[in-house]
Image (spheres, rainbow, N blue to C red):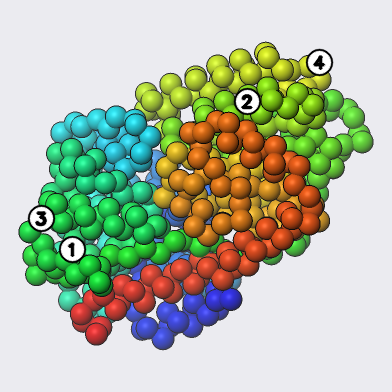
Amino acid sequence: MFLFRDLKDFIKSQNLKIIIAADAEPRVSKLVKGKSVLTIPAGGVAVAFDPIACASNAVFVGRGKAEEENLSGSKRFTVEDPRGNYTLNRIFISKEEMDDYYYGFSNQTLWPMCHVTFERPEFKDNWYEGFKKVNQKFAKAIKEEIKGKTFIWLNDYQLSLVPKYIGKQKDVTIGMFWHIPWPTWEVFRILPQKKEILESLLSCDFIAFHRGYQARNFINTIKREFEARIDLETNRVFFNGNVTTVKNLPMGIDTDLLSSHLEKDKEDTFLAKIVKKMMHLDINDNSDKRFDTLFKKNKIILGVDRLDYTKGLRLRLLALDKFFEKNKNYIGKVSYLGILAPSREKIYSYGLLKKEIRDLEKEINNKYETKNWKPINIIYEVFPRDEILKFYKNASLCLVTPLDDGMNLVSKEFVIATSFSADPGMIVLSQFAGSSIDLTRALIVNPYNIEEVANAIKRGLEMNVKEKVERIQTMKETLEERNIYEWTQNFIKSTIQANKQYD
């Protein structure tokens, strides 16, 4: 297994300055007892890069939140960590820029266009102008950090114009990881700004996606839009004097860090009380004061998601409704606990989704609830990672049923966490989640097929311990072999090899 120290040694051997850029940041500033302190957020792509930044002593360029501007005292500072320090360089943007760049073009144009969920993208010129301005700010901050032999690692759709604004730089290698799906050309061609974005991405030396079909969609898009020479054997695109290599590299997780958290895990009676209150259980019943016994006694089906139409939340609730309709013996014995992180609430479609979920939750509960039990329990809250791991470890079943998802790290984290239980949970996983290529022993379903998902729920709950242990252990071993450090090494190696300067 490739570990943190191995990655650190590898990066040192390359003699590179590493600059990582993403829309979010791996550490956030919070006011604690009158002092500004750095904390690690609960989740997200940027958080996954925290150990990578430590291993590489990188400069991380990310968008800071408005409330942090006065807390940190500086836009650029050192993040001190016993594993290795790195520099955090924050970009701050105005409210108007945030509306256009983030809520507008990023998440009402690119996001729905790239996900096959039949949510119509919107196109507004002012959104794109704001998007360009923020991408220029990122590029400016990155260029100021370039010194000598430099490796620039850009992340995701929000920064798709940054390669263009950086331009060709001596001794600089640029890699882009596109974390969300890439649609077919038939979908992408409707984007008014398609050529500028594609030209920008083809300024990179290397572009990677989670899955092979996403890389193929990208290459086919280039083929249909440009007179570019494409070598299909090597997946290299020759365009405007530049050579870009395209590849799929499924992202791993930090299995070592998760395991260390779980090994020193202590039961939390306070968290158990929160869950009891949330699920309308008797908070004074001391027989269930431990979190693990509470979960096992009540057989919890778990869902952990951002509130997003790509996650298949409505169809998931309909599948749970079908499950209870077909299996009335489970009424009063099994509960669904959905933890939804509020997301992009300024966007109309997200507010509408929240209302739909609440209405459907109420409708299903009215059908089946008893005096002391409800089948569907949804909380809109962000829990710290340590607490989320407790949920994962003790759930009987986890439902991860997105309609389209680049990867889905929740599914991978669940497998690691539940492996620490003598009677592990099982996972029902959408075939449209990128993680399904690694988690082949999960119960794979089509989330649009409500009957199939309902049957998988029953199968997962009734699976014997021996089979669950075997399935979970097999998937855990796969995740340990393909962890985030191995993934990082592969990405850096592939990008360097793609750059002719390093041939």
> Which residue in the protein does label 3 denote?
226
- N-term mark: 1 or 2: 1
Quadrant of residue 166 in the image? bottom left
Three-letter amino acid code of the residue under disc 4: Lys
Neighbour tally class for label 3: few under 14, some 14-19, many 20 plus, Cα within 10 Å: few
From mark 2 to mark 4, how far is it between C-alphas? 21 Å
From mark 3 to mark 4, how far is it between C-alphas? 64 Å
CB of mark 4 within 8 Å of CB of mark 1? Answer: no
Task: Pick the residue in front: 445 or 83.
Answer: 445
> Which residue in the protein does label 4 denote?
371
484 sits left or right of 368 in the view: left
Task: Pick the residue in front: 44 or 68.
Answer: 44
Q: Residue at x 46, y 61 (%)?
A: 251
From mark 2 to mark 3, how far is it between C-alphas? 48 Å
Three-letter amino acid code of the residue under disc 2: Lys
Residue 221: x and y, percent? 20, 52
Three-letter amino acid code of the residue under disc 3: Phe
Foreground disc of the pair 2, 4: 2
Three-letter amino acid code of the residue under disc 1: Ser
Task: Examine the rendered structure and indicate whether residue 321 appears above or below residue 82.
Answer: above
Q: Residue at x 56, y 19 (%)?
A: 360
Kind of element beneath mark 2: helix
134 sits left or right of 340 in the view: left
Residue 115 can be seen, yes or no: yes
| Label drawn at residue 203 | 1
> Which residue in the protein does label 2 denote?
322
Task: Examine the rendered structure and indicate whether residue 71 appears above or below residue 335.
Answer: below
| Label drawn at residue 58 | none
CB of mark 1 within 8 Å of CB of mark 2? Answer: no
Neighbour tally class for label 2: few under 14, some 14-19, many 20 plus, Cα within 10 Å: some
